[in-house]
Image (cartoon, rainbow, N blue to C red):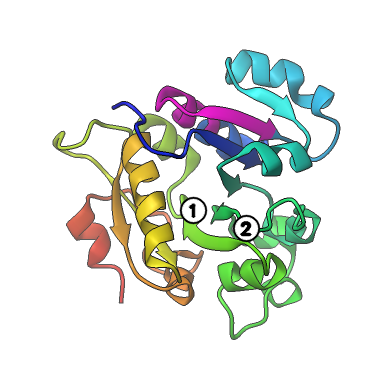
Amino acid sequence: MKNNTPVKSIGILGAGKVGVVLAQLALKAGYSVHLAGSGDAKKIALTTKILTPGAQAVTKEEAAQKGDVVILALPLSKYRTIPAKELAGKLVIDAMNHWYEVDGPREDTVPTELSSSEQVQAFLKDARVVKALSHMGYHELHDGPKQSGEPGRKAIALAGDNAQDRQVVAHLIDLLGFDPLDIGELAHGVQLEPGHPAFGANLETDALRSLIK
């Protein structure tokens, strides 16, 4: 499927397994990709050349500036290192999850009354955050893409407070090879977090929808 949308460039913050797979999918979908690790771009230049040929290894500030849409694929506890200034006015996809082994107790990172994406939105107060690309494992993301309408195509849920932003992210998900499932406002993204039925789901749309309250 060709990318005929105004979104031509994807910035990805996080060059781990999820970030690399998302970069591969975005390149295949026709996006230009700017991939950033945790430090000097030179540290991931060789990895980028081998695993995501065609992507540009950049700093996190450059990825934030150059991406028409920016995907967060960092450990959740590192969200305060995200370049908020450079993301002002940007559409940001939060693909992060809390993992105790990496992040420690959830309440140390996210207040109990908020979803993790609401906390990220509070930090990125001048950006627009949509929760997506977070409930499916990187193996399934890598192996699962199918053309629109192809039998067995899996679904990826998304949540955000702006309907137009959700439409943009839904189309991006479609181009990556999955059926988008819009579940409404950002607070509903808590249902895509670890400990909830939809987390880890690698399902078609109706089956995934049945797990969303």
**Foreground disc of the pair 2, 1:** 2
Relative vertical location of residue 136 with respect to residue 186 in this rendering, above or below: above
User: What is the crowding at mark 2: few (fewer than 14 residues within 10 Å), some, or many (at least 20)?
Assistant: few
Which percent across, then down, holds residue 202? 33, 48
Which percent across, then down, holds residue 106? 67, 72
User: What is the crowding at mark 1: few (fewer than 14 residues within 10 Å), some, or many (at least 20)?
Assistant: many
Relative vertical location of residue 213 with respect to residue 6 in this rendering, above or below: below
Q: Which residue is mark 2?
A: 89
Displayed quadrant of residue 18: top right
Q: Which residue is mark 1?
A: 134
Q: Residue furthest bottom?
A: 113
- Residue 14, visible in the rendered structure: no
Relative vertical location of residue 107 with respect to residue 77 in this rendering, above or below: below
Specify whether 202 is left or right of 102.
Answer: left
**Three-letter amino acid code at disc 1?**
Ser
Mark 2 and mark 1: Cα distance apart in space: 22 Å
For this rendering, which residue is in front, 210 or 122? 122
Displayed quadrant of residue 3: top left
Specify whether 93 is left or right of 124.
Answer: left
Please give the name of the residue rendered at 46% of the width and 69% of the height, measured from the top-left corner: 189
C-beta proximity under 8 Å, tags 2 and 1: no
Specify whether 189 is left or right of 49.
Answer: left
Please give the name of the residue rendered at 43% of the width and 31% of the height, measured from the top-left corner: 142
Q: Circle 2 sits in a helix, a strand or a loop, which is it?
A: loop
Where the C terminus falls, by quadrant? bottom left
**Three-letter amino acid code at disc 2?**
Gly
Q: Which residues are magenta?
A: 23-35
Displayed quadrant of residue 98: bottom right
For this rendering, which residue is in front, 146 or 203? 146
Which percent across, then down, holds residue 94? 56, 56
Q: Is residue 155 magenta?
A: no
